[in-house]
Image (cartoon, grey):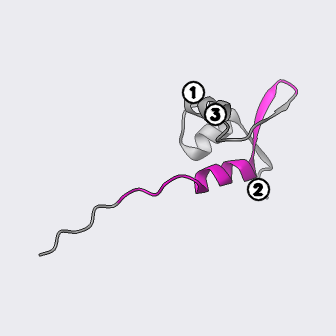
Amino acid sequence: MSKAAFSIDEFCTSYGVGKTFTYELINSGQLRAVKAGRRTLIPEASAAQWLKAQPPVNRPTPAAA
C-alpha cells in the first residue's frame, strides 16, 4: 500500500532533497502541501507530479568518429 502523504522528512528522504529546498518548493507553489494540525504534509500525487515536471538530465551526444 502506498502512502497518501509524506511528512517533510519522509519527502526529503524519498526524493533525495533537503528541507530548505523542500520549503522553497512549497513557498514558490511548485509543490503542494497541506496542514494537518501542526504537521505539514505533501500529498503523494503532488510529490509525483513535481518529480514528473522536472527536466531530464541532458546527456552529451557521442562524438562522431
Q: Is residue 31 magenta?
A: no
Question: Residue visible at 72% across and 48% down?
Answer: 46
The amino acid type of the residue labelled 2 equals: Ser
**x, y percentage for residue 8?**
68, 34
Tag 1 residue? 20
Task: From the viewer's side, name the closer residue of 51 and 9.
Answer: 51
- Amino acid on which disc 1 is placed: Thr
Q: Residue 45 carries which label?
A: none
Which dot, 1 or 2, sits closer to the camera?
1
Q: How crowded is mark 2: few (under 14 residues within 10 Å), some or many (20 or more)?
A: few
Could you give the CA–CA distance between mark 1 and mark 2, rounded to whole angstroms? 25 Å
Query: Is label 1 in a helix, a strand or a loop?
Result: helix
Q: Residue at the spot x=63%, y=29% of the render?
A: 23
Closest to the camera, between mark 1 and mark 3, is: 3
Q: What residue is pinned by disc 3? A: 28
Which residue shows up at 88% across the image and 26% down it?
37
Q: Is mark 2 on a helix, strand or loop?
A: loop
Q: How many labels does the image show?
A: 3
Q: Residue 2 carries which label?
A: 2
Figure check: 20 above or below 62: above
Q: Give the residue type at disc 3.
A: Ser
Please identify, in this view, whether the residue under mark 2 or under mark 3 is nearer the observer: 3
